[in-house]
Image (tube, rainbow, N blue to C red):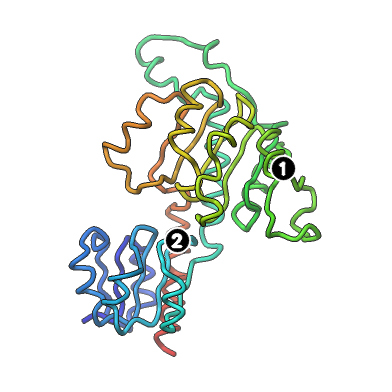
Amino acid sequence: MADIVITEFMDEAAIRAHLSGFDVHYAPTLVDQPDALRAAVADARALVVRNRTQVRGALLEAAARLTVVGRLGVGLDNIDVGACEARGIAVFPATGANDLAVAEYVVTAALVLLRRAWFASDAVAAGEWPRQRLMGRELSGKQLGLVGYGAIARQTAIHARALGMSIAAHDPFLPADHPAWEGVRNLPLADLLAHSDVVSLHVPLTPATTRLVDAAALARMKPDAILINAARGGVVDEAALVDALRGGRLGGAALDVFEREPVDAAAGRLFAGVPNLLLTPHIAGVTVESNERVSAVIAQAVAARLAG
């Protein structure tokens, strides 16, 4: 049986470079085969996952020899960290390795939604020329409101400031005298929502953040504001967001994460025909370059743990 089981996609060059001394079972479709997954981890000492593999309950019980879990990303809501700690299983997220990718996604989504011109392909190809209808707005001079002000949000702020945006943030866990606040308005959440032109979410999914952006929060936002969620799907009330967009009470939104992932056809019907809405399949933090960085960081951490 394998020393290391990898259940979701990973850069294979990192596997060869850093895990060649171990017996590796690389099967990126295992996440969709629960019985095979439990059998595969029965003798594994290490498990490497992304966000879909639920490292809890029956899976942890099946992995009797497990000593380390490597997370190809940063969110840990799919891992029962407490249960791992109780068993002495180390959990390693790839902290910092995909910050740049997410920051670029947020700024790109803001540009696309504010400018609007990128929605014109079908119309132009059909012989239309809707210049006036597609007159958009500039990013420069707008306020970016960051809900959560950790490493990814700070990287996003750097990019946004370079494009002429002012920055506000809400983070009750970051001390008011922290150096990261320099040049950034530290606002209560209600004020940040009310005064920001673009709101980007950067919080983990916890009981306190579940549906943090609900109908009441959306009602506080400017009617032409943009909401971007590349954090966790459960942070946004999706039905309330769709209602706000359909009713013209919000300028646009980009969702990279969803309450249920992957989104199936039934769940996707909620979003069909919604104006000014961008949907992407949880890829904000996944680029060729970030995948290489994330994979290398986790491969090295797992190898070091197994080597003692």
The circle on residue 295 is: none
Which quadrant, please, contains the N terminus? bottom left
Query: Closest to the observer: 8 or 20?
Result: 8
Label 2 residue SS = loop
The answer to whether residue 109 is left or right of residue 10 is right
Q: CA distance from mark 2 to mark 1?
A: 28 Å
The circle on residue 77 is: 2
Which quadrant, please, contains the C terminus? bottom left
**Number of numbered discs:** 2
Please identify the quarter of the rendering in which residue 164 is found. top right
Q: Which residue is mark 1?
A: 167
Label 1 residue SS = strand
Query: Closest to the observer: 36 or 130?
Result: 36
Location of residue 165 in the rendering, given as x and y in whole percent from the top left corner: 70, 37
Location of residue 275 in the rendering, given as x and y in whole percent from the top left corner: 45, 23
Q: Earlier in the sequence, mark 2 or mark 1?
A: 2
Please identify the quarter of the rendering in which residue 136 is found. top right
Q: Considering only vertical position in the picture, is 244 above or below 265?
A: above
The answer to whether residue 244 is left or right of residue 144 is left
Q: Residues within 10 Å of mark 2 (few under 14, many from 20)?
A: some
Please name the residue shown 46% across and 79% down the image.
Answer: 85
Please name the residue shown 41% across and 83% down the image.
Answer: 87
Query: Closest to the observer: 163 or 2?
Result: 2
The three-letter code of the residue at mark 1 reads: Ile
Pick out the residue farthest to the bottom: 308
Which label lies toward us, 2 or 1? 2
Please name the residue shown 44% across and 37% down the image.
Answer: 238
The answer to whether residue 76 is left or right of residue 172 is left
Location of residue 263 in the rendering, given as x and y in whole percent from the top left corner: 32, 43
The three-letter code of the residue at mark 2 reads: Asp
Location of residue 277 in the rendering, given as x and y in whole percent from the top left corner: 46, 30
Q: Considering only vertical position in the picture, is 22 above or below 122?
A: below
